[in-house]
Amino acid sequence: MKNFLNEYAEGHAAYCIENTRISPRLYEEYGVNLGLRDDKGVGVLTGLTGISKIVSSKVINGKKVPCEGELWYRGYRIEDLIDAIAPEEYGFERLAYLLIMGKLPSEKELGDFFSVLGQSRTLPTNFTRDVIMKAPSEDIMNSMTRSILTLSSYDDNTKDTSVPNVLRQCIRLIAVFPLLAVYGYNAYRHYEKDDSMYIHMPDASLSTAENFLMMLRPDKKFTKTEAKVLDTALILHMEHGGGNNSTFTTRVVTSSGSDTYSTIAAAMSSLKGPKHGGANIKVMEMMEDIRAHVKDYSDKDEIKAYLSKILNKEAFDQKGLIYGMGHAVYSLSDPRERVFKQYVETLAIEKNRQDDLKLYQKIEDIAPVLIAEKRKIYKGVSPNIDFFSGFVYEMLGIPKELYTAMFAIARIVGWSAHRIEELITSNRIIRPAYMSIMEEIK
């Protein structure tokens, strides 16, 4: 039956392609913005939000001019928020409170929120055995999504979309996402890769970043620097405006009146797409390829020559892309990358990976200029946060299967904030229009 279905699909796919294809010329003819982007790549406005803001240009003397990128959470610049976190503290929980509640917490409010997260970091009895371990998969995002939907079966108020109930559900998901990711990976490595099985219980006294590292590692050990860098990575990934694909998915599904578990599962399905959440994996694969072909990491000419081959589709995956360079919104710089870079350097020193760091830094200098020259891009090209995040995850010993899941562990905060904002501010279903170009057959 399976072979018959495969043969049928392969034999009939040509009909789908032939009879479904729409000429790109028609989008221009009818003034339709493909992918909700105008001809300059700027997103079409589809809503309002007070949760975060991205700035990539400013109007000077009546002219729009590219500027150093800015990211704001609830009225605060991301740099200022991170600078305000003491060196010995972790900020993920504080800024999660800010995004969801709309204000920075007092010390008591932060303590209560931290405590609630810690107490909520549990799964139903036998859930790990009966749900996560029953169908292990290399695709941890699929594993997590299945678990999210199954958790709805353990909730007596799944369909209640009142703000208090949705807030409860969102806090619960923020708390358990690290468990779903780590346990899903451990089940995969045991059943599919014949490795040892260990399931560490979370510690309510530890932060989200600390718990993740503790649960992932056989010996439960981690350094302060490791946890601090991971905490910062989670902060920088937790929210990025309302226009990104998975957040827009969250708003669309929320607007239909669907429950929290279904909404977040939809966002997960959006995030896992390689055009959205899988960029850091491509960076790591590219860097492995560069290491294999560049002998002298200090030779700028050798590095430039190989990067040129990548751009000319002569090397790596023949796609002509230097991954981790450029962004749909930012031009001169990605503020997340600017902030993160100093933490990457600190971790590289601790891990004795200075040579690899130098290679990254040289590519960071060479690639933007090379891309701008070859692609005739005048708005500016700069490294984005994905350029360094994969390197950090590698240094932390986080397997590639978990890279996109790390994104989800952070972004569940932003999704939660946007779901609540959509519920509070709008009672209208998001229903975009599509123009039919179908020819009537008579």
Image (cartoon, helix red, strand yellow):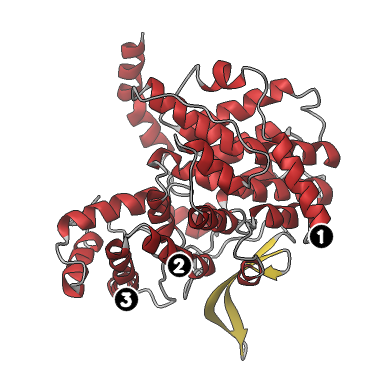
Farthest residue to the bottom: give it: 61
Residue 211 position within the rendered picture, expressed as x and y whole percent measured from the top left: 58, 42
Q: Amino acid at mark 2?
A: Lys
Residue at numbered disc 3: 369
The disc at residue 106 is 1
Closer to the camera, 50 or 20? 50
Q: Could you tell me which residue is drawn at 65 percent across and 61 percent down?
A: 45
Q: Could you tell me which residue is drawn at 59 percent across and 27 percent down?
A: 147
> On the rendered structure, is 257 left or right of 197?
right
Closer to the camera, 410 or 441? 410
- Secondary structure state at the residue bearing disc 1: loop
Q: Amino acid at mark 1?
A: Ser
Residue 436 position within the rendered picture, expressed as x and y whole percent measured from the top left: 57, 43
Q: Tell me: residue 331, above or below residue 356.
A: below
Q: Could you tell me which residue is drawn at 54 percent across and 59 percent down?
A: 37
Closer to the camera, 283 or 400? 400
Q: Tell me: residue 212, above or below residue 323.
A: above
Closer to the camera, 288 or 159? 288
The disc at residue 341 is 2
Q: Residues within 10 Å of mark 3 (few under 14, many from 20)?
A: some
Residues at marks 3 and 1, CA–CA distance in whole angstroms: 45 Å
Residue 400 position within the rendered picture, expressed as x and y whole percent measured from the top left: 39, 42
Work out whether mark 3 precedes mark 1 in sequence or the reverse, and give the earlier one.
1
Q: Amino acid at mark 3?
A: Val
Residue 229 position within the rendered picture, expressed as x and y whole percent measured from the top left: 51, 57
Q: Could you tell me which residue is drawn at 60 percent across and 58 percent down?
A: 240
Work out whether mark 1 precedes mark 2 in sequence or the reverse, and give the earlier one.
1
